[in-house]
Image: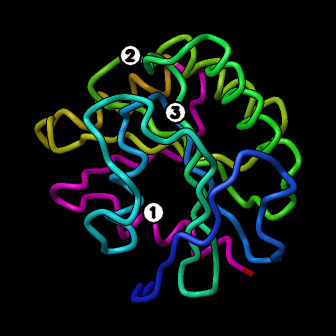
Amino acid sequence: MNVNNVTLEVVCVAPRDYPDSFMPEFAFVGRSNVGKSSLINCMINRKALARVSQAPGKTRTINFYNVENQLYFVDLPGYGYAKAPKSEKEKWGKMIEAYLLKREQLKVVMCLLDIRHEPSEQDKQMLSWIKHYEKNLIIVLTKADKLKRSQLPKHIAGMKKALDMPDAIVIPFSKETKQGKDELWAQIQSLIP
C-alpha cells in the first residue's frame, strides 16, 4: 500500500471512545518494549507518529491510527514488565481484552514477539486467548536484523514449536532493514474488503 496520509485519530481507554467507523482494524499486541510502535512507524513510513520509548510501558491507551481512510492500525498497551502498579496493569489487561473480544471491525491480531527470545508465559497466554476466541492471527517476530539470515528458519521453527502453533503465519520483521514490511502489507491488504 502506498501510504501518505496517516493520523492518530483516537486515543482511548474505553469502548465508548472507539471510532464510529466500519473501516477494518488491525491490532498490535505484545510485551512492553517488543517494538509495536516502531513497527507501526515503519509500516506507515513515519519516524515518530507512534511514540517510541526505551522505557517499557509507554503506550497506556488504545491508539487508533487512520491509514489512508482505508483502515486503522490499533496500538494496544504492552503487557509484561512495565514499571506500573499492579492495579494499572490489570486495568490495561481489561482494556485489551475488551477491545479484542468485542470489536467487530477487528480483522487480525498481530502478536509481536522478539525473535531472539523464547516466548514468555504472558506471550503464551495471549496467543492461547487469541486462539480460543478464534481471532485471525499473524505472529510478527521483531528485531530480525539481530540474527544472521541463515539463523531465521531455525528461530521461526523454534518459535512455532514453543507456541505449539505449527500452522501459524509467522513473519520476521526488522524496522532497521524493513525486512517483512512488504509481506506484512500483503497480508493486511488480503484482509481488506
Q: Is residue 16 above or below residue 57?
A: below
Of the pair 41 and 107, the residue shown nearer to us: 41
Counting from the top left corner in percent of width and height, residue 69 is at: 62, 87
- Residue 137 pos. (x, y %): 64, 46
Provide the residue designation for mark 1: 184
Query: Does residue 52 appear to the left or right of 168 in the view shown?
Result: left
Residue 56 vertical position relative to residue 186 in the rendered view, above or below: above
Magenta-colored span: 163-192
Colouring: rainbow
Split into 4 quadrants, where in the image is the N terminus?
A: bottom left
Residue wearing tag 3: 78
Q: Secondary structure at mark 3?
A: loop
Identify which amino acid the numbered label 3 is placed on: Gly
Residue at 39%, 22% in the rendered image = 158
In the picture provided, is 35 more to the left or to the right than 107? left
Tell me the kind of residue under disc 2.
Glu
Picture quarter with the C terminus: bottom right
Q: Nearer the viewer, mark 2 or mark 3?
A: 3
Per the image, is 170 magenta? yes
Label 2 secondary element? loop
The residue beneath circle 2 is: 118
In terms of sequence position, does the residue under pointer 2 or pointer 3 come before the other?
Answer: 3
Query: How far across and down, in percent of the image, does residue 104 sit?
Result: 87, 59
Q: Estimate the spatial distance between the alpha carbons at disc 2 and disc 3, rounded to whole Å.
A: 17 Å
